[in-house]
Structure formats: C-alpha cells, structure tokens
Amino acid sequence: MFVLVLASTAAGAYTANPVAPRCGDVIHVSGEAVAVRMNGRTVPLFAGSGPARVGLMPVPLEEKPGKYPLEFLGTDGRVAGAVEITVREPHYPKQNIVIGKEKKELRPSPGETETVRAFRETVSATRYWEEPLVLPVRGCMTSPFGVARLHNGQPTGSYHRGIDQRGATGTPVRATAAGIVKIARMFNLHGGTIGIDHGQGLTSMYLHLSRLAAEEGARVEKGAVVGYVGTTGFSTAPHLHWALYAHGVSVSPLQWVQLKPCAAPVRAKKKKR
Ligand SMILES: [Zn+2]
C-alpha cells in the first residue's frame, strides 16, 4: 500500500512515502530542500527530474515505534517543512540456527569488517538504480529480513539484516539494480562477496558466493550476473544472502521486491512396524 502526503507551504511541497513505515523500511522523500532529518539522522537530497530534490530516509530496525517529525532542511540548515511519520512495530519473528564448531571459530579476514562497513556507508551523487529492483535469484525465501537470530538456542542480540533465498551452488546471482561494483572479494566470514553502489545512498550486497563474476570498479546493469550461489564463509548450506542498505542502514528488500517464503518442510511420517 502506498500513502502519499502533500504538505503544501509557501516554499513548496514536501512529500514522504510511506508516512507509516515499519522498522526496516525506507521513506522516499521529495521536496525543495538539501537534506532531511528524522530522529537524529540526517541524509542528503539529490537533484530529481523537477525542482524538488529526492532522497531515501531509512528507518533502522532498532527505531522505537512512534511518531517522529521528518524535517526538510534548507541550505541555511533551517527547517523548511516537515511531514509527520508514524513508525510502526514490524513484528519480525525469531529463528534458531544450528552452528557447528568449525563455523563458530571463523574469524574475519584482515580488513574484512572495515571494508564492508566503509562500503555500506558509500553515498555517491550519481543515481544508477531505478525501480522496480529485480530478484538476484528466483528461489523462494528461506529466511526473511529482521528475524531475531538465535545461534544454537542462544539469543545473539542481532537481527537478520538481509534475506536468504534458496539456490543450488552455481546458480547465477544477478544485480538487483545497476551500479558500480565496490567489493568483489572472497572473505572468511561473508564468503564470496559482491557489493554494489547503486548511487544516492542505496547499496546492495550478495554473500556466500561460490564464485565471483564481476570486478571491483566495473559498472553493471540491472540483472547482470555478478556471481554464483555458494556456501562460503559463515553459512551452513548453499543459499543466497543478499541485503540492501540506505545510507549505511540495513533495510528490508521486501519493501522493494516480491518474494514468497518457502513452504514449511514436510515432516516424514513415522513408519509403522
Ligand atoms: Zn542470511
């Protein structure tokens, strides 16, 4: 469902969509301003097709549900307009994962953590992405975004910051949108990793790949094959984990693409003896 609110003032119109996002969603904003601010986070706006500038305000998974003003800031830093946002409780489920000793002892490659963090924070002015985004693989979803993860029954305090899709090793993985490849590396934890900068604050990552099919610095089009499904790094079976980030904040791909969860596994009937 899309909700559009127009707040007309002397300075122009300020729009936010949706105005009632869930934690993990992105708010598409537009207005004659240079930046927007919400709950202490400020993100830049970029030139759009008209006089209004456009941008993406992420709502982090950890955001407290409630009402927040989304403020549009002018060149002088003053608030030029505002839209009221109601952040809704997302009701994400919990999931336990059984992890063997060998995986538990995995440590990041030298520079892995820093490289990934710096990549996610990438904000470049050129916009390569356009909607709709495409699914990197066709497989059903084995684990949705935002699930509170338990490892061997123990809460980890972390959330699943991406989605998992079923895929056999070697299945081609496609770029969800056009962009510039910033990471094409085999890491210890993330495994075979592709990171793409889609511009204007939107980035995507594809993990646990068995093979990479793109080089760092390359420009890729939407749907281009950038790697192949695998189970490298911190992964227990072949699948594709992919993630979207808006201004470094992990956001739900399910706001952008439609994806069906895999059917629950059919339990084998107990044989009668
Ligand atoms: Zn995953």
Image (spheres, rainbow, N blue to C red):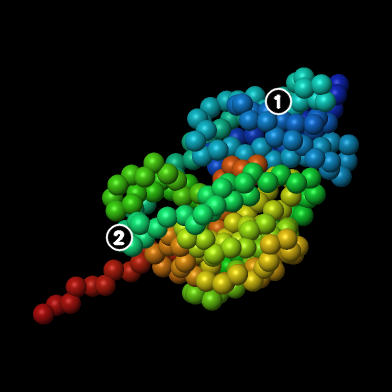
Left or right: 23 as drawn, with respect to 204: left
Q: Position of residue 136 (x, y in %)?
A: 61, 65
For discs 2 and 1, the disc positioned in front in the rendered view: 2
User: For residue 57, which numbered disc appears in the image?
Assistant: none
The amino acid on which the numbered mark 2 sits, given as a three-letter code, is Lys
Identify the residue under disc 2: 101
Left or right: 174 as drawn, with respect to 31: left
Residue at the image point whose x is 43% and y is 48% from the top: 147
Q: Is residue 137 above or below residue 128?
A: below
> Callout 2: 10 Å neighbours few (<14), some, many (20+)?
few
The amino acid on which the numbered mark 1 sits, given as a three-letter code, is Glu
Front residue of 151/188: it is 188
Identify the residue under disc 1: 71
In the rendered image, which quarter is residue 143 located in?
Answer: bottom left
Q: Is mark 2 within 8 Å of ligand 1?
A: no
Front residue of 77/17: it is 77
Q: Position of residue 255 (x, y in %)?
A: 60, 49
Q: Position of residue 53 (x, y in %)?
A: 81, 37
In the rendered image, which quarter is residue 175 located in?
Answer: bottom right
As measured in the structure, the alpha-carbon distance from the residue carrying label 2 to the one carrying label 1 is: 48 Å
Q: Quadrant of the C terminus?
A: bottom left
User: How many numbered markers are drawn?
Assistant: 2
Q: Is mark 1 within 8 Å of ligand 1?
A: no
Q: Is residue 18 above or below residue 178?
A: above
Q: Quadrant of the N terminus?
A: top right
Left or right: 145 as drawn, with respect to 172: left
Taking the view exactly as shown, the residue that stands out farthest to the right is 51
Q: Is residue 90 above or below residue 210?
A: above
Q: Position of residue 132 (x, y in %)?
A: 70, 57
